[in-house]
Amino acid sequence: MADTTLGTATGTRPALFLRNATGLVKAWSTFDAFVYSFWSVNLITLGLYGMSYVYWVPDGQLLAAIVVFGVLTTFLVVTYAMLVSVMPRTGGDYAWQSRVLGGGAGFVLSITGWWFTLFLWAPIYANILNVQFFEPLAYTLGWSGVASFFASTNHTGVFVSCLIVLAFVSVVVTLGMETYARIQKICFWIGIVGLVVVCGLLLFASQSDFQAAFNREATSLFGAPANAYQATIDAGTKAGYAPHDFGFFSLGPIFLVLPFLAFYLLWPNWGATLYGEVRGAKDIRKPFWSMFLGLWVTVGMVALVVILIVKTMGWQFYNAANAAWYAGTAPVGTWPYPVMFAGWLVDNKLFQALLIIVMGLWFFGWAGTLFLSSTRVIFAAAFDRVLPSWAANISSRRRVPYGSLALMIAPSIVVSAIWAYKPDFQSVFLDATAVLALTFFATVVAAVILPWRRKDLYEASPIARYKVAGVPAISIVGVITGVFLLFMLYQWSFNPDNLYGTTLQKTQSSMWYFIATYVVAVIIYVAARIIRNRQGIDLRRIHHEIPVE
């Protein structure tokens, strides 16, 4: 961990931070931050995938749960927007936790979530790419061999898909923030056009139209027997799906749906680590609206798509198709991708393929979220001298932290290979969402105590004037957010029916894996303290100061 770029404050004692300034530039507008937040709670890639498990909750009213989740997550948005305005610095969670909770706690909690957990998501991204792009496109074009290659049972195909994801993400991140902003906006606008087409198909078709189209294509593409629509419903029922009316309302089941929705709706704050590179971030309105609109535009779209699916595909069919797929008994041999099914309403393979390609931009616009936010957390820790200095080096032209990116790519390749060729290892991924929620919870705790723990920062910030009955507003919204996160953490860990497949008693390998990552983070921090002390650098002083952007 020796430094070759140590600055000096007096000529005899090393300066606190690695450099006088990070060297990063404010390349993003508020709209760029909105688009990034919108992609982070992606309706297509994450939303359709996450909602495919909702059938596990008997009588769960999906629309009501989505609205409730949106309301509760708004408190998370407000909390993070306030923290951004207090300290609009690269690193987000790491910067706030280390300056309020202390350097050790901040490093361990944020690095475990944003570094050690995020490279686990590379295979998850690859799996989504397979089931929403490669497989449906290959089946549509009659390339059954290509579809089989990317199937989850083909170890090499899975690994190749992981490498494709890693290569694409690495390229778009190294192009720099300005170029990535252009890429995500192009994908955004074309993807919206594709969604309008999908919604139009579902709006103007009847359920009998869909049944006829599904039966036709299921037989044509997959050799399914006649009336595959009804066969799918029957297979789903046998797989354990308990049919219930879409309009049924019961309060209890709504809350049990929330931990499933977290898979995609919990991330409007995903860009919080990037606000050191967003113009005007100190104005609370800009980070708030970028995250708030990213969340609620998505909530509105999800509600519309769900209603159209119920209208045209049928609520029982939608849930039964998911249940049959996960049970391995579906008449159609591919993940029940609503976009692919909607395309079947037009009896033209070229149109169907083009629709899948256009909607694939929802993946490619979103894919950069895999590494972009994490590189800034690693960068911030290196800038604070906790990690080696080379992890904070940036390119002179595009201002890309290549060292931080390398620390994401290398372990992701290893993890992807293990995922592909050792399927038993996949069980350790079960708590990936929970660990990130725990990271957010630590930030929320920092927000609650900020007005007293770091009174100097709070009183100098724009949010000091926001109080309710004399109590800082950031503490109030932080407490509400914390209760919301604790509820989901409890359900993931202790739900008596193991509804989410993540109960600690049932996921020992996952639990021990993540415990090990926290231990490794502690070891890294302790080693850094020892090494920096020998170099005359006090990490405690660094974590009390605010880095200059």
Image (spheres, grey):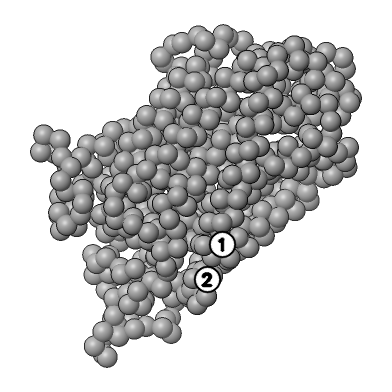
Q: Which mark is residue 398?
A: 2
In the picture provided, is 206 more to the left or to the right than 395? right
Instruction: Indicate the position of residue 389 as horizontal and vertical percent values.
Output: 43, 75
Q: Amino acid at mark 2?
A: Arg
Query: Residue at 48% of width from left, 55% of height from top?
Result: 373
Q: Confirm or deny contact between disc 1 and disc 2 (CB under 8 A).
A: yes
Give neighbour class at mark 1: few <14, some 14-19, many 20+ (Cα, 10 Å).
some
Q: Relative to 236, is 484 on the left or the right? A: left
* Element assignment for label 1: helix
Please give the name of the residue rendered at 74% of the width and 47% of the height, measured from the top-left corner: 158
- Looking at the image, which residue is at 74% across and 17% down? 210
Q: Is residue 361 above or below residue 532?
A: above
Along the line of sight, the residue nearer the viewer: 380 or 283 = 283
Q: Nearer the viewer, residue 286 or 327?
A: 286
Numbered disc 2: secondary structure: loop
Q: Amino acid at mark 1?
A: Thr
Q: Image quadrant of residue 549? A: bottom left
Q: Is residue 120 visible?
A: no
In three-dimensional space, the C-alpha distance between marks 1 and 2, rounded to whole angstroms, equals 9 Å
Q: Residues within 10 Å of mark 2 (few under 14, many from 20)?
A: some
x and y, in percent, of residue 521 in the image? 42, 59
Q: How many numbered discs sit on the rendered protein?
A: 2
Q: Which residue is mark 1?
A: 179
> Is residue 379 something one can see in this rendering?
yes
Picture residue at 20% right of the left edge, 40% below the top: 473
